[in-house]
Image: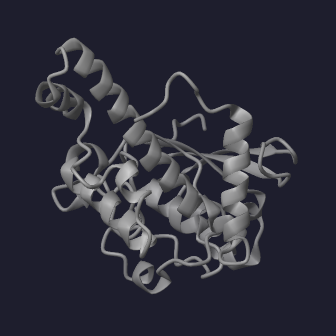
Amino acid sequence: MTDRSNPISLAQIHSYLWGAATILRGLIGAGDYKQFIFPLVFYKRLSDIWDEDYTNALATYAGNADLAKAEADERFVIPAGAHWNDTRTVAKDVGKALQDAMRTIEAANPGSFGGIFGDALEAPRFTEADRLRIFDVVLANPPYSIKRWNRDAWSSDPWGHNALGTPPQGRADFAFFQHILASLDPHTGRCAIRFPHGVLFRNEEAEMRRKLIESDRLDCVLGLGPNLFFNSPMEACVVVCRARKPPER
């Protein structure tokens, strides 16, 4: 259960996250940290929220555990054995235990968390009539320049995400970009995406940029200076696109 009488401080959170990154340093690329740490933070937070709901319901129902669990499960379900407190006691094959717990939570909450811990590029979370659902607005901050991703599968992507081409293995930025573009409503769709500044000029992606401009979906590019973000001094940009721009633009 969460100890609400002794909450963790922001400094402690920073210290723990930095410690996790230090343990992983040398094992994975710096840009891949978030692929490991963010799901863990989200998994822990889900467990904490469920605990809070359960504790409050337990007080409401005078200690009736069955009624308290039923009410806690109304927001989302944490199945038996898949709670953070279950996996943190595992001594062997911890990675498999975490993966099994996350998959169990996904399966128990298909409408809310189906596929949320997995690879959204390879298995899109939002589908409808055998297509990725479309949206009016998408705001995104994709992980920067992922190096380990399934480029071969992307080159023959069944969801139609590779209209601009296949990104280089060392930089998956345009894979996320095309995933988002393909998710826009063809009439009303708009998106704003934060990218590393390199997507605007790297040679490997020149042909994809040319096709993007020719498609007339690029609406605005905002250049952002260095040292704006807590965890990185790098320059970035925000790319704004519209599926169908108004005549004056």
The residue at the point 58 percent across, 76 percent down is 167
Numbered marks: total: 0
The residue at the point 36 percent across, 42 percent down is 135
Residue 117 percent coordinates (x, y)? 39, 58
Residue 80 percent coordinates (x, y)? 21, 50
Quadrant of image for the N terminus: top left
Q: Nearer the viewer, residue 177 or 215?
A: 177
Q: Is residue 243 visible?
A: no
- 240 to the left or right of 183: right
Q: Is residue 224 above or below residue 156?
A: above
Q: Nearer the viewer, residue 221 or 65?
A: 65
Q: Nearer the viewer, residue 185 or 68?
A: 68
Q: How is the image coloured?
A: one colour
Residue 164 percent coordinates (x, y)? 52, 70
The residue at the point 67 percent across, 51 percent down is 17
For residue 229, what is the image quadrant?
top right
Q: Is residue 164 above or below residue 196?
A: below
Quadrant of image for the C terminus: top right
Q: Is residue 165 visible?
A: yes
- 227 to the left or right of 4: right
Residue 11 percent coordinates (x, y)? 74, 36
